[in-house]
Amino acid sequence: MKINYRPEIDGLRAIAVSAVIFYHAQLNIFGKNFFEGGFIGVDIFFVISGYLITSLILKELENTGKFSFSYFYERRARRILPALIVVILASLPAAWLFLVPGNFIEFAKSILYSLGFSSNFYFHYSGLQYGTEDGLLKPLLHTWSLSVEEQYYILFPVILLIIFKFFRKYLLGFLIFGFFTSLLMAEWGSKNYPAATFYFLHTRMWELISGSLLAYFEIFKKGRLNNSVLNSILLNNSVLNSILPAVGIILIMHSIIFYNDKIFHPSFFTLSPVIGVSLIILYSRKNEIITKILSSKIFVGVGLISYSMYLWHYPIFAFARIKSNIPSQYDKLEWIILTVFLSTLSYFFIEKFFRNKKTKFFKILFIFLISIIIIFSSLLLFYKNSNSFELTKKIRRSIDDKKIFLENDHYKFRKSYSPKNFYNIAKNKKKVLIIGNSGGEDFFKIFYLNKELFKNYDFELISSKIRKRNSVYQVKCLEQLIRQSITKCENFEFTTNILDQFEKSDIIILSTLWSEEDLVVLDNLIALIHSKNKKIILTNTSIFMNVYTANKFNPLDYYIYSNKKFPDKKKLKKIEKEVFENLNQKKLNNRLNDKAKKFDIPFLNIEEFQCNYKDKTCDLVTPDNYKIYWDRTHITEKGAKYLGNKIYELNWFMID
């Protein structure tokens, strides 16, 4: 069942895909990123998809009284699969060339989940946060939104058909109920479970249903309102038809320009662009100015290739970042140009060909099957020859220089050191308890290996036996242990009895590889420790946490891996300057600083002793050329000794 073509909707697609692409490119114009809210483009796509799919289904049901699932899913397959398969096939050689084995295995998994339209689950349970620098290096991360849409396409037609057949008079009520239920879950979840709320269908469904409500109104209500007073007031009112599309575009552009990663999303905030899209779809008229602009050739042209642009841009950006490590603004412009070029080819030679009804569907299925065989064969071949992470270790050892590639002495230190208690500590020393995950362990290592310099303190450590991707579990467990005076949480265990250590300590340092979820639950823990009359200090951890780290190397390791040699002094200084220029922890530091101000506690920023603000460099090696970091986030013993000396000389650890 055909629906009337509306060029302004392609114009909306053009805005959506442009916002997403500029957001992912992180392109600065005159030193400012004007697209920090560009992730809203996905929400625009969701509303449009909900509107078009529901229009298709309801018109078929209204006109014929039945619905063809086979035809519906054939159309979806023609629309989605061919271009997706081509992008995956094109990504395989790049992944083979630029990804080290461990990352290639992750890439392979993301392919399988993407083809199964469940990559949103994969990326969530991998602990990957959308919008972080780690995420920008995952070539298929953007397929999470395709998975959400396809899950909706699988469930929604069945539910809609049942309601239409048996509870038709309640259809609008069901849609409204679904809209508000999903919206409320999104609002609550964005504050309590932000990652799951971002990735999963149940908190995105309201955006798709908003489009469904527009379709319902257009098909069933609009016709009944013809020649009525209400129709003239709401729909054919020339003032509203002139003003509301402009209001809609203002709401959309405001969200794209002024929103950023700090907002809770999706949530009530997301209502703004969703309402904006809805106003344009509902009130667009042929001679209205916003409709004319959105229907212009440039907007429609970009809208027509928007699906291909969405598919191509992310792997292009990801592989380019992996290859160049720290890209320039000109590099990013080249990525965008390449995206437009490949997307244009993809639209005319892939999308149009497979969506043409003259192309028999069995041919599409045959090509799809052959493509799947090629993809699986390639993944299997690489897997058998890679030996996964072992090859990565061999590559790292290919340069026979212990100053460059030290063994994993982070875990060596963990095995050699057993957390103790404060029972036999001299009374004239401050008892400092450091709590955290591996980031906290590194912070402890700096002071433990330099204890002769910090004679007024005794440091101890609490870390976890059970490793988690992020430390939110640790934060919640720690609060539970202190509050309930128990020794172990369900499914989580610390290295020692923390209650004894906690009671004896004078100062508590919270030092971990912070995630957004950690910061959400941190207030309760700080308030609880405060109530126990303990002094609290917050710190951040690795300077590389939000610096591009291709293939999980830090920038120095990446240079060594790519060039098979240690950089000379001039090149090393350049890398250290690049690291300083790309320190992207400002957002995290601001959040931690806000927490510190809220509770009137110190926040110690590690950048102050690891980086030189005058020279605009960050230390990557010790004066005798030993690496400070052995991987992306963890420090070597040589690095710990050196950083401890710097802390002492700078008098950075002022906590009395």
Image: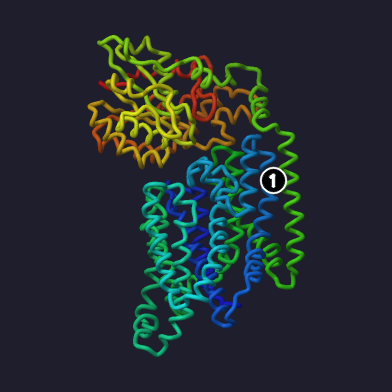
Front-most of residues 294 and 461: 461
> Residue 14 or 375: which is nearer the viewer?
375
Q: Is residue 66 above or below residue 204?
A: below
Is residue 297 visible in the rendered image? The answer is yes
Quarter of the figure with the N terminus: bottom right
Q: How many marks?
A: 1
Crowd class of label 1 (few under 14; some 14 to 19; many from 20; radius 10 Å): some
Q: Given the image, on which type of amino acid does mark 1 rest? A: Leu
- The answer to whether 471 is drawn above or below residue 225 in the figure is above
Q: Read off the residue under disc 1.
A: 92
Q: Secondary structure at mark 1?
A: helix
Of residues 110 and 626, the one drawn nearer to the viewer in this rendering: 110
Q: Which coloring applies here?
A: rainbow
Q: Residue at x 65, y 22 (%)?
A: 397
Assign the C terminus to one quadrant of the image. Answer: top left
155 vs 235, left or right, is right
Measured as percent of width and height from the top left, residue 82 is found at: 68, 60
Height in image: 494 above or below 213? above
Residue 181 location in percent, x, y? 40, 61
Q: Is residue 506 above or below residue 265?
A: above
Where residue 289 appears, x then y in whole percent?
A: 43, 75
Note whether residue 613 is visible: no
Q: Residue at x 77, y 60 (%)?
A: 366
Q: Residue furthest bottom?
A: 227
In the image, residue 522 lies at what x, y percent? 34, 37
Pick whichever, 641 or 85, lies toward us: 85
Q: Is residue 382 left or right of residue 567?
A: right
The residue at 39%/50% (across/down) is: 190
